[in-house]
């Protein structure tokens, strides 16, 4: 499976918190990029870290001045967006759909500033909205889970029960049933993207209920599922999300459904630097190599060549339209396996 290499950057580069004192200043004419994280913050090994990797790449290869403001709660979104806007950053990134209303307000107040939001659509002329076909990558994760499961019983653990996460849930469940129509798929939601303890607790409930593989699409809370899997018997797996989480528990994280937020951040920054800023709504998926499974570096003994070839065939069937993974529960209810 083809995919762009994810820049394994988890350290904070040129990080400036709202209460920080001295910090590096931009050079005249330098591209300036600001970012506001979602509540999971940097170090989530998932969504926010993926976005930050794109920012670090822009700093390193586009000679950009960068600054990151971390949101401790939703109440920080608008103040952080305003702070970067007042500093006249050329591009400001809102990382997460929860910022959509706050970004709409701030973008209208600063019509000459460029903004990018991830996972939401904000209909303002100075905002680029980037969304992903998460259901497609999740379908691949579900298909793989069904191939590997010994119990014919797997599970989905989401962060919050909202339309965005239901794309992951529906795609995963359909992928499972593409391979094994009789397999059971349990579904639970943490109710949070940053409650690691709750993620671990619910993962243990799912494992104790008979699932031997959990797809954890829960942001930082998903780290709890990885911790739970570590304590389980051999043959118990977890599938990571957003960033490449395979190395967090080698041989236990079966694969990760990588969502390249880093690509969205970098490509919008590069377009701005080249004087051709992106506009409108951009959707990224398998065809753009913006989502996909990792390369089974630590699980090649489990995911052999036959499974990999089968996953590759399913991936191509999605790209060419033969398979259309569902993105809602209603679509899932009417989904019919193609039988690849």
Image (cartoon, rainbow, N blue to C red):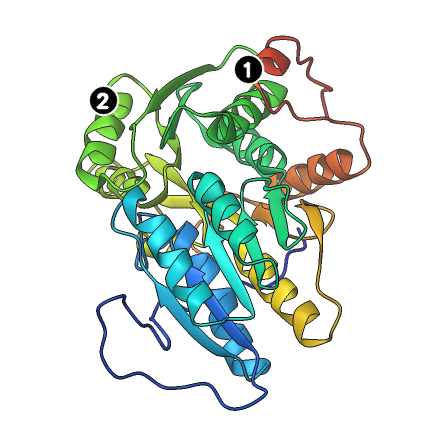
Give 142 or 101, whichever is nearer the viewer.
Answer: 101
Badge 2, how many Cα within 10 Å: few under 14, some, many 20+? Answer: some
* Label disc, if present, on residue 329 of the rendered structure: 1
Identify whether 319 is placed above or below 179. below
Q: Is residue 115 left or right of residue 315?
A: left
Secondary element at tag 2: helix
Which residue extends farthest bottom?
A: 28
Badge 1, how many Cα within 10 Å: few under 14, some, many 20+? Answer: some
* Label disc, if present, on residue 205 of the rendered structure: 2
Q: Earlier in the sequence, mark 1 or mark 2?
A: 2
Which residue extends farthest front?
A: 109
Q: Is residue 113 left or right of residue 244?
A: right
Secondary element at tag 1: helix
Question: Could you tell me which quadrant the C terminus lies in?
Answer: top right
For discs 1 and 2, the disc positioned in front in the rendered view? 1
Position of residue 16 measured from the top left corner of the image (x, y, whole percent)? 31, 72
Give 6 or 102, whichever is nearer the viewer.
Answer: 102
């Amino acid at each position: 499976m083809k995919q762009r290499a994810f820049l394994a950057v988890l350290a904070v580069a040129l990080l400036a918190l709202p209460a920080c004192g001295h910090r590096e200043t931009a050079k005249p004419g330098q591209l300036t990029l600001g970012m506001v994280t979602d509540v999971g913050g940097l170090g989530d090994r998932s969504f926010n870290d993926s976005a930050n990797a794109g920012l670090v790449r822009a700093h390193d290869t586009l000679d950009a001045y960068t600054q990151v403001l971390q949101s401790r709660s939703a109440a920080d979104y608008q103040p952080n967006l305003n702070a970067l806007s007042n500093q006249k950053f050329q591009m400001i990134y809102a990382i997460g759909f929860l910022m959509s209303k706050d970004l709409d307000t701030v973008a209208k107040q600063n019509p000459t500033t460029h903004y990018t939001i991830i996972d939401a659509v904000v209909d303002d002329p100075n905002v680029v909205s980037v969304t992903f076909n998460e259901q497609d990558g999740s379908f691949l994760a579900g298909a793989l889970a069904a191939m590997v499961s010994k119990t014919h019983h797997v599970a989905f653990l989401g962060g919050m029960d909202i339309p965005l996460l239901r794309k992951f849930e529906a795609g995963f469940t359909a992928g499972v049933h593409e391979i094994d129509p009789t397999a059971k798929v349990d579904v639970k939601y943490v109710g949070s993207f940053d409650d690691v303890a709750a993620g671990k607790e619910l993962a243990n409930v799912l494992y104790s209920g008979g699932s031997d593989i959990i797809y954890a699409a829960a942001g930082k809370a998903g780290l709890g599922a990885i911790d739970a899997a570590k304590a389980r018997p051999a043959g118990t797996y977890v599938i990571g999300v957003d960033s490449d989480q395979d190395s967090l528990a080698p041989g236990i994280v079966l694969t990760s459904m990588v969502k390249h937020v880093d690509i969205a951040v970098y490509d919008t920054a590069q377009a701005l630097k080249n004087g051709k800023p992106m506009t409108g709504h951009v959707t990224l998926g398998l065809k753009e190599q913006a989502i996909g499974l990792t390369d089974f570096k630590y699980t090649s003994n489990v995911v052999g060549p036959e499974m990999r070839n089968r996953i590759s065939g399913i991936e191509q069937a999605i790209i060419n339209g033969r398979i259309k993974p569902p993105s809602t529960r209603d679509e899932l209810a009417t989904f019919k396996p193609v039988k690849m």
